[in-house]
Image: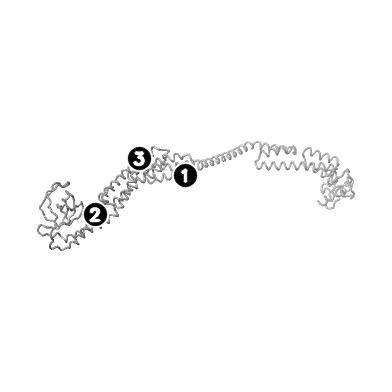
Amino acid sequence: MANNNYQIQQNNICQFCQSKIKSKEDFITCPSCLSVYHIECWYENKGCAVYGCNYKLPNSDSEPKIFNIENILINAEFFINKKQYSEAINECNRILNVYPDEIGAKRLYNSAVTALNLKMKILADAEDAFEKKDYKSAEVFYKNSFYYINESEHNIINNKLQIIRDAIPAYQRKIFFKKAAAYLLTVLILLTLTFLLYYYIYLEEDREYYAIEKEDNTEDIHIAENQIFRYENFIRKYENGRFRINAIEKINLISANIIRKLYKDDWKTALKYLNKIDENSNPKLHNDLFIMLYTTAETEYTKFKSNAKRFNAQRKFVESKNETEKALNIINYFPGTEIDKDKINLNSNLNLLNRKISYLIKYKDIEKELDEKIEELKKSKEVESGNIVKVNAIIVEEKSPTYYLAKNIFDNNLIALKTNDVTYYKKGDVVILECKKSGKINVNDDKLGEIILPLYKFGSFSRENSNVSSFDVESLVQRLDYLRTQKNKIDSLLSLSL
């Protein structure tokens, strides 16, 4: 059937007489297969002549309508004006199926198709927006569709618009609440981000400072020392921070508390914490604590200095040296103070003590040799022959140019010696004289007062039964004299006070 219609549209041939239907000529189409006929041919054949259709005219009611082109064009234009585009297209097709080149039918056909397409597009967009609940857009599309819809469709669109008008407030409320919720969520996120930035970045210094500060109230020295360390790190990290002055004050306060706890038992450690106190920001506190530490150190210094003198007097030179070095060490902690003025004297004392320590061994060696030589002399005791004796003695004091006090080498007893006018002795000389016992004599001594001593007079007497040669004795005496001289020199050095 479609092929047949296509053939008719192409040839405009009457299917009964097989001649072409002329332009503007009235024609009839078969109600069944839409084949075209001349009016006369249709009635002459009493129906359709197409094979397979065989439509006949049974009665007058079923007769096809006779089409006039002018009337069809008027109908088509009428349908377009009534916005019944499908009907207008059908009317145009009736003409174009027979006369494809009919200009009027083409114009109206194009207008109807264009209007129908626009209507369908607008309604499709409106339905799509409606389904998406974009009621504002749907309302606009539906209102625009009024230009292309007929009266029957108008009521449907009005119903749609009414639904939209009812839905818009609820939808707007929903949109409003969605927007409000989104706005609130955005505000909350911004506030949260702002708070986080404020808390973790802007308040970072505050948080760190207060985290340190809450550990301040402690009596434990180790925790307090750690607090100072934490505040110092805080100052280094926030060199120009808002809490820099507060941190310095905290260091001053904690250091002062540590100093007050330590200075009596460990002023040196306490002094380290004095250096942590900012003298410029708190000069009075720094000065008061310094005086407190200095007083304690000075007391200790005086003690060491006194101990050094005491040990020196006891000839404990190594101990004295140790105490002197301790005193010097204290001075080094307080340069420019009163005790610093003693530094030169203490260094001199230290040098003297070093000399004493070095001479002490030599002194002991001399004492040892003196004892040995005296033992040798003891073996050559004075040889008595009547009242004549050999005296081995050390001059102690000169009473007159010929009269001396002496100490016997062997028994350390004091004796009095009377010599001739040509012989002169001085204190400390060792003498070996042959003398006569001449009784006893009263002698005044500055320390012992009046004492009675045996008196020996020097003279030339013959010696008998001597076991030791005079040369040996003289040699021993000379050595003893030298050793005693050396001992006296060293003893003078060792006896020097600090």
Q: Give, as a three-letter code, the residue at label 1.
A: Arg
- Alpha-carbon span between mark 2 and mark 3: 51 Å
- Alpha-carbon span between mark 3 and mark 1: 30 Å
Label drawn at residue 291: 3
Q: In this orientation, does residue 474 appear? A: yes
- Residue 472 in the figure: left or right of residue 279: left
- Alpha-carbon span between mark 2 and mark 1: 70 Å
Q: Give, as a three-letter code, the residue at label 2.
A: Thr
Front label number (3 vs 1): 3
- Residue 192 in the figure: left or right of residue 384: right
Provide the residue designation for mark 1: 236
Residue 105 % position (x, y): 83, 42
Q: Are marks 2 and 3 in contact (CB under 8 Å)?
A: no
Q: Secondary structure at mark 3?
A: helix
Residue 195 % position (x, y): 52, 40
Most extreme residue toward the front is 422
